[in-house]
Amino acid sequence: MVAVKSKKKKQLYLILLICLELIVISYFSFSFLSLLNPPNECNSCNVLIITMDSLRADHVGSYGYSRNTTPNIDKLAEKGVLFQNFIASGPLTFISLPSLMSSKYPVLTKANVSFEKDEDTHLFYLNESHVTLADQLTGRNYKTAAFTVTGWTKYTNMDKGFQLKNNLLDKGPYEDVIAREEAISFINDSMDDKFFVWVHFQSPHTPYTPLYQYNETFYKDNNYRKYGLIDIPNNKLPHFLVNNEPGGYYTVDADYFVSQYDGEIRFIDNEIGKIIEFLENHDLMKNTIIAISSDHGESFAEHGLYFQHEYLYDDQLKIPLVLYNPKFPSQKKIAKQVQGVDLYPTIMEFLNLPYKKEELDGKSFNNLIAQKPYEERIAYSESIDYNSFSLRTNDWKYIFNSNGSQEIYDLVKDPEEEENLLIRKKDAMNLLDNKFRREIKRYMN
Ligand SMILES: [Zn+2]
């Protein structure tokens, strides 16, 4: 009898010991995991990336624009983080969007050849060996879909890795509206699972023909007159302007075209508003990460380029990035520069998913948002048409042109990049810090 009692006691003691051990182990592993887990972690969250073509950051309301072009984006910016210096990997769609989706720099970075030349089209095709953000999430049981309205999708493979690839170009004047409708329909069918959706709207790309009433929204707004009448040399006319005037110039009211460009932004902002409204009505804002951005900016008359985008100046490289993560603090603005290739690894960290960091050119800027140690990086961009590239810090821009000419701009004193310091000062290179000079040499070799 005594032996049985003591056996029971022993069993009880053993059970108590195991329970205690379990409590201790789970406590320590919980603490350990919290140390390991990145800040802003949003496990199993959905991802929605929306880009619109040719959107300059300075034409977005929350970036300080005087016109009310983006009420819906501005509302989202109040709930998330706005990056004041987000730099595209190039001023052309077929350079920047494959870079955004693959976190690989474009072709001229000799250390990281990212694109294969397609012999038939003579364009550049995203290498099949690169693992895109869509590849990552498709492989993790996300339902993934890309709704792109651009002629470049099929030539660049920019939607590599998405299960559903829906290129809606040439679906008529309402192609952007169709893209929005199809994206909402896909989310509606996928919300019981995790989803990753990318929508790329064609507007506000030229020829600036906004739908609905948006062609009049800003036209009669006399508060905004910046460019006035400009003379465009015939050989620099954009594709949508035909010169009916005699002589070598075509005189146009640039502010009229800017008002139509702004009308297109407002039109797309309205489409974005409908997608966000859908997410709100279906309680998806609590578990969806949203990024709103562009592929590149647009020059209206700056640097001798009229209603186009081909050069490496900030009007064509500085694009908006509004990032919403339910785990973020709201109403945050970050001035430190980040770049297109950095978005993919940042989203991977938000989702707390492992990935091969060494295979990507981008680096996560999650720590920057969380105010943890973050090493500032040089932004690299290139323009394939002219075989030129630029390196940019928060304070300086260096441009190397294919004809061998070089440019240096002091972005603090000269944000419009009007005075090339290498013309006036022979020793302009010495103005740059050692690290930047070393980086320039690395790219020159
Ligand atoms: Zn574009």
Image (cartoon, rainbow, N blue to C red):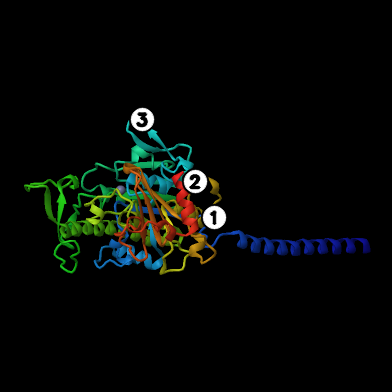
168 sits to left or right of 104: left
Which residue type does callout 2 highlight?
Gln
Q: CA distance from mark 2 to mark 3?
A: 28 Å
Determine if residue 51 is in view. yes
Q: Residue at x 31, y 63 (%)?
A: 72
Residue marked by disc 2: 136
Q: CA distance from mark 1 to mark 2?
A: 12 Å
Q: Residues within 10 Å of mark 3 (few under 14, many from 20)?
A: few
Give percent across and percent down for residue 259: 19, 60
Mark 2: is the Cβ under 8 angstroms from ligand 1? no
User: Relative to the observer, which residue lies in front, 189 or 61?
Assistant: 61
Give percent across and percent down for residue 241: 15, 47
Q: Secondary structure at mark 2?
A: helix
Earlier residue among tags 2 and 3: 3
Which residue type does callout 3 highlight?
Glu
Determine if residue 1 is in view. no
Residue marked by disc 1: 352
Q: Are marks 1 and 2 in contact (CB under 8 Å)?
A: no
User: Relative to the observer, which residue lies in front, 143 or 405?
Assistant: 405
Circle nearer the viewer, 2 or 3: 3
Q: Residues within 10 Å of mark 1 (few under 14, many from 20)?
A: some
Earlier residue among tags 3 and 1: 3
Residue marked by disc 3: 119
